[in-house]
Image (spheres, rainbow, N blue to C red):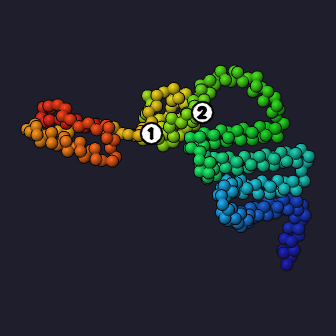
């Protein structure tokens, strides 16, 4: 009994000292629990409601913010727990700034997920507006870059960095930057030319002087082409925009040329009769263009009679 009284007194003493710390820890644990409850019940209920609407854009919007909202509960829990502690004014200001930065990061995270070229929201928007893959990927990357840049400027402002001076400095140094980055800018404008003129789409089989293969992706700087031996070829957009590009996927007709070899002892009648039958078969085939059919005797080879087909 005496030992129990000592333990109770010991615990009571330390609890009286660390009451605020324990309460702060309890606040954090409550928000961790709330996060699980929110995701498991409330968020899933919102997803089910969104699935019943005519469009799936609202569902994809919610899914893009699922993980950022989960992180938001932790940020709010940490913020409230720290604010409950007996801290001085400077420490409180730092905690408030960090909390604001956390909110900025969470919002940017959700928007970047939403605008990502591979996101379900963008795919749904692409199907709804009938935008091709090249355009959606290119502008998706531009918008994400702008969002991240804005977030970085907002975070810099929280640390009292002179953003206005920075922007003014960009204006003064714009010419020097453009001269230093002229190749990068040329590639970006080359990419814009490719997107607007649409000489090819994602998945097309193309041939340029620098590469041949299937188009996989267009980035700010370059176009990626998968060659037929599975090698990945990266070509600067400025280079590709100035090349002659053959798009085999856009061909209305495909040319087939080859030779048939007959025994040298084949008679003229049999050879001519065979040529006439081949012409008839080809002309009666609906998949073959009738104006581009040529079948005729070509030449004497060392061991055969060659008939040319086009």
Q: Secondary structure at mark 1?
A: helix
Tell me the distance, in whole angstroms, between the alpha carbons under discs 2 and 1. Answer: 21 Å
Question: Which residue is pictured at 66% across the width and 64% down the height?
Answer: 52
Mark 2 or 1: in front is: 1
Percent of width and height locating residue 300: 14, 31
Q: Quadrant of residue 175?
A: top right
Question: Which residue is pictured at 26% across the width and 36% down the height?
Answer: 294
- Few, some or many residues within 10 Å of mark 1 (<14, 14–19, 20+): few
Q: Is residue 123 visible?
A: no
Q: Is residue 145 left or right of residue 300?
A: right
Nearer to the camera, 201 or 281: 281
**Pointer 2 or 1: first along the chain:** 2
Nearer to the camera, 88 or 68: 68
Question: Which residue is pictured at 85% across the width and 67% down the height?
Answer: 11
The circle drawn on residue 299 is none
Q: Is residue 306 left or right of residue 109?
A: left
Nearer to the camera, 166 or 116: 116
Residue beneath disc 2: 192
Question: Which residue is pictured at 62% across the width and 51% down the height?
Answer: 128
Residue beneath disc 1: 250
Percent of width and height locating residue 254: 36, 39
Give the quadrant of the N terminus. bottom right
Q: Is residue 24 left or right of residue 278?
A: right
Percent of width and height locating residue 94: 85, 45
Q: Is residue 217 visible?
A: yes
Q: Is residue 62 above or below residue 225?
A: below
Q: Secondary structure at mark 2?
A: helix
Nearer to the camera, 160 or 289: 289
Q: Is residue 172 above or below residue 265?
A: above
- Few, some or many residues within 10 Å of mark 2 (<14, 14–19, 20+): many
């Amino acid at each position: 009994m005496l030992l129990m009284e000592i333990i109770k007194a010991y615990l009571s003493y330390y609890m009286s000292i660390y009451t605020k710390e324990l309460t702060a820890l309890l606040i954090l644990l409550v928000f961790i629990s709330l996060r699980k409850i929110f995701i498991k019940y409330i968020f899933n209920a919102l997803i089910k409601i969104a699935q019943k609407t005519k469009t799936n854009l609202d569902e994809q919007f919610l899914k893009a913010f699922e993980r950022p909202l989960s992180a938001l509960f932790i940020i709010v829990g940490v913020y409230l727990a720290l604010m409950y502690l007996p801290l001085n004014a400077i420490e409180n200001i730092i905690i408030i700034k960090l909390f604001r930065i956390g909110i900025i990061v969470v919002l940017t995270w959700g928007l970047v997920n939403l605008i990502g070229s591979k996101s379900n929201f963008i795919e749904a928007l692409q199907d709804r507006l009938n935008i091709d893959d090249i355009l959606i990927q290119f502008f998706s990357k531009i918008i994400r870059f702008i969002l991240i840049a804005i977030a970085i400027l907002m975070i810099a402002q929280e640390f009292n960095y002179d953003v206005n001076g920075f922007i003014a400095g960009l204006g003064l140094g714009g010419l020097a930057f453009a001269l230093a980055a002229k190749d990068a800018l040329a590639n970006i404008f080359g990419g814009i030319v490719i997107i607007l003129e649409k000489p090819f789409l994602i998945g097309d089989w193309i041939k340029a002087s620098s590469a041949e293969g299937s188009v996989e992706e267009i980035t700010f700087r370059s176009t990626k082409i998968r060659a037929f031996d599975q090698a990945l070829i990266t070509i600067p957009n400025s280079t590709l925009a100035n090349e002659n590009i053959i798009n085999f996927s856009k061909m209305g007709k495909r040319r087939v040329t080859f030779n048939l070899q007959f025994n040298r002892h084949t008679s003229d009648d049999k050879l001519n009769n065979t040529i006439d039958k081949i012409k008839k078969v080809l002309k009666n085939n609906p998949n073959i263009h009738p104006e581009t059919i040529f079948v005729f005797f070509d030449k004497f080879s060392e061991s055969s009679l060659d008939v040319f087909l086009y």
